[in-house]
Amino acid sequence: MQWLLEQDSIDWATLSELYRIAPLAEKKPDDLKRAFSNSMFKCFVFDEGTLVGAGRAVADGVDCSYVCDVAVHPRLQGHGLGAAIIDKLVELSAGHKKIILYANPGTEGFYRKRGFARMRTAMAMFVDRDRAIERGLIDRA
Ligand SMILES: CC(C)(COP(=O)(O)OP(=O)(O)OC[C@H]1O[C@@H](n2cnc3c(N)ncnc32)[C@H](O)[C@@H]1OP(=O)(O)O)[C@@H](O)C(=O)NCCC(=O)NCCS
């Protein structure tokens, strides 16, 4: 496996395809380029030239690092790569007072095993609030 911690050679359409098949979400290549460019930490993992894993963290350098967009190619899921990506983003986030994320419903156990605990006071505003409720991300009230 080859790890890249910068994005100069990344093909955003390929990353978009990885997120589609993982599956994580439909994400437009241009949006991914902007999101990763605005993220302090990022990692991409290649297996013989094929992009098989990725993740990023938006961080302020002092207080908070927000881990997101972690996904592994379906062919390699269940072999420790997702855990290694989280461990790398946590390592890169060293020095921040907290590292936060929100889990895709069903992946909470994966993050718990990496040391994350459920936040009691986390709150969010979603542009598509009804969809977030439908996906089980937020309460209706
Ligand atoms: C979630 C995801 C990143 C996990 O990556 P992975 O490489 O398959 O996971 P790993 O093999 O590193 O698993 C590490 C540990 O977490 C456990 N685990 C993996 N997925 C899990 C899940 N959904 N729920 C609970 N535990 C899980 C594994 O059993 C393993 O446990 P072990 O250390 O006791 O053996 C991957 O399945 C994925 O890309 N899913 C689709 C996209 C997604 O949902 N991303 C998360 C966004 S919040």
Image: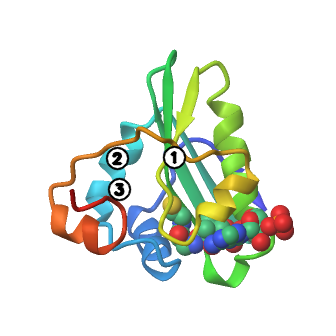
* 134 left or right of 42 in image: left
Q: Earlier in the sequence, mark 3 or mark 1?
A: 3
**In the rendered view of the protein, which quadrant contains the N terminus?**
bottom right
Q: Which amino acid is tagged 3?
A: Leu
Can you say whether 71 is above or below 9 in the image?
Answer: below
> What residue lies at 65% left-to-right and 32% top-to-bottom?
92
Q: What is the tally of numbered marks visible in this picture?
A: 3
- Which percent across, then down, holds residue 49? 67, 69
Marks 3,2: beta carbons within 8 A: yes
Residue 32 shows which numbered tag?
3
Marks 2,1: beta carbons within 8 A: yes
Q: Secondary structure at mark 2?
A: helix
Residue 56 shows which numbered tag?
1
Residue 129 shows which numbered tag?
none
Residue 35 shows which numbered tag?
2
- Which percent across, then down, holds residue 98? 56, 27
- Which percent across, then down, holds residue 53? 62, 64
Q: Nearer the viewer, residue 40 or 48?
A: 40
Q: Which amino acid is tagged 2?
A: Ala
Q: CA distance from mark 2 to mark 1?
A: 9 Å
> What residue lies at 56% left-to-right and 47% top-to-bottom?
118
Q: Quadrant of residue 72?
A: bottom right
**In the rendered view of the protein, which quadrant contains the C terminus?**
bottom left
Label 1 Cα neighbours within 10 Å, binned few <14 / some 14-19 / many ≥20:
many
Q: Quadrant of residue 75?
A: bottom right
